[in-house]
Image (cartoon, rainbow, N blue to C red):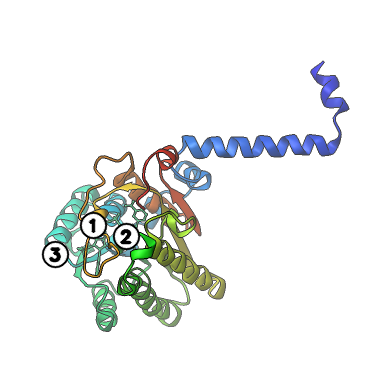
């Protein structure tokens, strides 16, 4: 009976059913998995993070959250690190955690602490020299430092728009340009730039207008870079809601104000899992990936 039905089906009908099935399975996988299908596949069957052993990865915003988790995931596989952010004590703590995770694969000199305020653009070049003097190479820059936002669109002070873009976009682009110049002029045109974007950088959410716009801008900057410099690797990593303390520091609509809230009660992907998936995306030189729990995104308020 079934045979007769398939036999009588036109080729177009058959293709149509295949297409529906394909999208059905794809959406199902989105709901079941905690990242996009390609990233999940690479985490199982792609390059192991240990293929990066000995490489030097510079992570901005490494003192907490996703940056900290990424650093520990890379350290576990013997990747040498530059940890940068403003809070020295937290960076020292992350350095200790990295060395413990490395279980002898890394010595203290392999995990460099670089105290740095991303907003001081005039010091970026000196920071890059510090990294190169220490390691004599740089393989990957991970632009992770950033702050989110909670605000009504209509109430946002224009100075908040400017301040958020200064940190989440212009500081990132400025540092990246210096590193890309190093890759092009001193590294044979090879190198890898990664950026922590956000799902909000692809699909805007309410009450974070400046942040959504900033992450859209970041995506555009790095996609353009990839189109111009084919030999460079560029990874745009877009997390959904992740369990970090990022709302504590998030902008509001008022100049100088912070949200000062915790996301502890929300159902979110852990920072550790996010950091591990980010490391997989970098090890596999993936262009664009995302991670997050899909179901809570439909049932909970979204802070990205
Ligand atoms: N958590 C989420 O749900 C989520 C979702 C999507 C995307 N993201 C993105 O993930 C990235 C990391 O956020 P997170 O969630 O891990 O939050 P987090 O724990 O607050 O981390 C933010 C990091 O940025 C650093 N930073 C902030 N301002 C800086 C400055 N002026 N100079 C240098 N470093 C600075 C902080 O270090 P110091 O304070 O020590 O300087 C900290 O290490 C951000 O780009 C964020 O937009 C987060």
Q: Secondary structure at mark 1?
A: loop
Q: Which residue is mark 1?
A: 259
Which is nearer the N-term, disc 1 or disc 2? 2
Which is nearer the N-term, disc 2 or disc 3? 3
Q: Secondary structure at mark 2?
A: loop
Q: Is residue 110 above or below residue 48?
A: below
Residue at the (21%, 59%) spot, across then down? 63
Residue at the (37%, 48%) spot, across then down? 302
Classify mark 1: residues with Cα within 10 Å, few (<14), some (14-19) or many (20+): some
Q: Which residue is mark 3?
A: 88
The answer to whether 150 appears left or right of 2 in the picture is left
Q: Is residue 181 above or below residue 31?
A: below
**Residue 113 image-quadrant placement:** bottom left
Foreground residue among 257 and 25:
257
Kindly identify which numbered label has been placed on residue 149: 2
Residue at the (65%, 38%) spot, across then down? 22
Q: Nearer the viewer, mark 1 or mark 3?
A: 1
């Amino acid at each position: 009976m079934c045979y007769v039905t398939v036999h009588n089906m036109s080729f177009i009908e058959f293709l149509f059913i295949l297409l529906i099935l394909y999208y059905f399975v794809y959406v199902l996988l989105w709901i079941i998995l905690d990242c996009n299908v390609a990233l999940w596949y690479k985490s199982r069957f792609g390059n192991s993070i240990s293929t990066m052993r000995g490489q030097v990865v510079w992570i901005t915003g490494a003192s907490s959250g996703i940056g900290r988790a990424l650093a520990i995931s890379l350290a576990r596989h013997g990747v040498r690190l530059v940890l940068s952010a403003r809070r020295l004590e937290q960076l020292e703590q992350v350095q200790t955690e990295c060395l413990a995770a490395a279980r002898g694969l890394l010595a203290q000199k392999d995990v460099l602490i670089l105290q740095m305020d991303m907003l001081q653009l005039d010091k970026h070049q000196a920071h890059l020299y510090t990294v190169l003097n220490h390691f004599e190479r740089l393989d990957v820059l991970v632009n992770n430092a950033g702050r989110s936002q909670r605000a009504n669109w209509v109430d946002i002070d224009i100075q908040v728009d400017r301040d958020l873009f200064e940190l989440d976009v212009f500081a990132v682009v400025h540092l990246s340009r210096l590193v890309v110049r190093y890759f092009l002029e001193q590294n044979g045109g090879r190198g890898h730039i990664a950026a922590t974007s956000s799902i909000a950088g692809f699909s805007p959410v309410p009450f974070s207008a400046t942040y959504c716009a900033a992450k859209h801008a970041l995506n555009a900057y790095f996609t353009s870079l990839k189109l111009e410099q084919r030999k460079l690797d560029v990874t745009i990593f877009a997390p959904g809601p992740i369990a970090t303390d990022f709302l504590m520091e998030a902008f509001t609509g008022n100049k100088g104000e912070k949200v000062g809230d915790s996301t502890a009660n929300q159902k979110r992907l852990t920072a550790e899992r996010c950091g591990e998936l980010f490391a997989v995306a970098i090890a596999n030189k993936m262009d664009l990936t995302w991670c997050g729990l899909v179901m809570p995104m439909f049932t909970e308020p979204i802070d990205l």
